[in-house]
Image: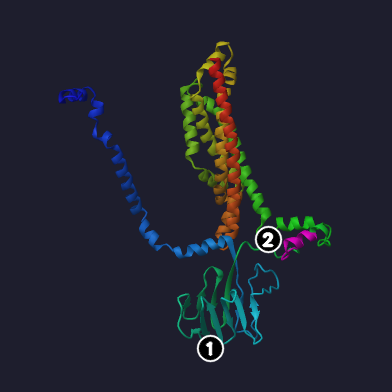
Amino acid sequence: MAMTADEISAIEDRHPQIFQRPAYKRFWPLFLIAGTVLYLAYALWFFSLPQVLKESHWERLPLFLSQWISYDLQPEFRLDQPQIMPKYPRFAALGENPNPNWVIRNPDGTYTVQIDGEAKSVTFDKTRATIVANGQTVPVSLTGGKPEVTGPVPDWVTVHNDEVVARMGFVGEVRVTVDRVKVRKRFLGWANFVFDTRSPFFGKSAGEVLSLIVSGPRLGSGTSNLELAADNIWNNAQWQHGDVWTKLLQTIVMAFLGTLLGGIVAFPLAFFAARNITPSGLLSQVLKRFFDFMRSVDMLIWALFFTRAFGPGPLAGSAAIFFTEIGTLGKTYSEALENIDDKPREGVLSTGANGLLVQRYGVLPEVVPIFISQTLYQWESNTRGATIIGAVGAGGIGLKLWEAMRTNSNWANVFYMVLLTLLVVFVFDNISNFLRRRLSRTLHDYNRLQAAQG
C-alpha cells in the first residue's frame, strides 16, 4: 500500500536525525576527499616536488644500484713512460702482481683490454687507440696534443677538450687522454668476500681450500689450516666480518638491555600512574606527564645527548633506548592496568588481603601477558631503532654503516650490512610474533577460565 505525502512528511518530522541531517554529516565523505586533495596539492607546492623530480639525476640510479651488487677493476696505462705497463689501484681486488687474462699484450707491442670479451674492448699504443663497442669501431688519434676521434662519433662516446670517454653500460668504460688510458671493468658479485688478498687461501677454489684444510700442508706456524682459515675470514681486511658481526651483536644487546631496563623501571611506576590503582590522583597525573615527556623526546635526540655525556659507544645507545622505553612502556602499562576487570581484584580484597597481595593475585595474572606482549613488541622495534641511533655515534652496526656510507665508494659493504640488519630484524620479528601469539592464547584461556568461575 502506497504512503501518502502527509504520512511521509509525518515520518520525516518524527525522525529528523535521519531525514534532516546537517550538511556536514551528509557530505563528510566529499569534504574528506576534497581536504585530502587540497593537502596533497599544498605538499607538492611546499616541497617543490615537481622541480625536485625534474632536477634529479635519475641517470645515476642504475650505476648507484649496481655498486651494491658488483665491483670494478681499474687498470691504468701510462703512455708517457718508456714502456707501457698496467698499473692497478693499491687495494685492487686482484691482489699483488695481478695478471688478469682480459688484459692482453699483443706481439706488436700494443695492449688490448677486453671489457666484455671481444665485443667491447680497447686496443692502444702511444699514438692511437681503437675502441670497439655496440658493433662500432671508434679510432682515436693521440699524436696531435689532444685525443681526436677520426670519423663519426657515436652517442656512447663523449669527446671533451682533453679526454675521450666511451661508456659501455654496466660492464664499464674507457677514458683516453694523450698520456694515459684508464679502463673501468665491472664484475657482478662481491670481490674477496671470504678471503682477502693477504690470505694464503686467496684465489683458490672452494675445493682447493677444503683440501688444504682437511689434508694439506700446514700454511701457518703454530696453527692448523682450519684455524688459519677461520682467522682469515674473521679478520678479512676488505669486508671486516669480525668487526661487522661484533657491531651487530652490540646493536642487539643495546636493544635488549635498553628495553629490559626500561620495562623494569616502568613496571612499578605504571601502578602508581593507573587511576584505578594509585591512591593519589596528583601522583597519577605527575607520572603520566613524566611518561609523556620521556617518550616525546625522540630516541635519536636522547642518543645525541648521551653521546655527548658518555662519548660514542653502545652505552649511549642503551641509555637512549632505556629513557625512551620508560615513557613508552610506562604509558602502555598504565593504560593496560586502567582497563582491567575489577572483579578478580575485588574478590581478593574481600578476603582481607593487604594492598600488595591484592595487586599480586588480583591484578598481575591479568596484565602480565599484556605487559610481556607490549615489551616484546618494543624490543622488536628497538632492534631497528638501535641501528638508526648508531649512526649518530651510539655504537653498534649503525655507526659502522654510517662510516661506510661516508666514503661514498664502499656501497657493497653498505649493502652487506643492510642485509645483515634486515636478517636480524626478520628473525627477531618472527620470534616476537611467535611469543606474542602464545601469550595471546594464554590470555584468552585465562579470560575463559575467569568467565567460567564467575
Q: Is residue 153 left or right of residue 368?
A: left
The tag earlier along the polypeptide, 2 or 1, is 1
Q: Is residue 156 left or right of residue 45?
A: right
Residue 450 percent coordinates (x, y): 55, 19
Q: Nearer the viewer, residue 153 or 312?
A: 153
Query: Cα distance, mark 2 to mark 1?
Result: 43 Å
Mark 2 crowd level (few <14, some 14–19, many ≥20, 10 Å Cα): some
The answer to whether residue 242 shows anywhere in this view is: yes
Mark 1 crowd level (few <14, some 14–19, many ≥20, 10 Å Cα): few
The range drawn in magenta is 201-212
Give the number of callouts: 2
Name the element at disc 2.
loop
Question: Residue sitting at 60 percent across and 34 percent down?
Answer: 435
Q: Which amino acid type corresponds to the residue marked 1 in the rendered image?
A: Thr
Disc marking residue 237? 2
Q: Which residue is labeled 1 in the image?
A: 143
Residue 424 percent coordinates (x, y): 61, 46
Residue placed furthest toward the top: 351
Q: Is residue 171 above or below residue 19?
A: below
Question: Residue sitting at 53 percent across and 86 percent down?
Answer: 142
Q: Is residue 382 above or below residue 107?
A: above
The answer to whether residue 316 shows anywhere in this view is: no
Question: Residue sitting at 28 percent across and 33 percent down?
Answer: 25
Q: Is residue 387 above or below residue 16?
A: below
Disc marking residue 314? none
Q: Is residue 17 above or below residue 241?
A: above
Name the element at disc 1.
loop
Q: Nearer the viewer, residue 26 or 78?
A: 26
Residue 64 percent coordinates (x, y): 52, 62
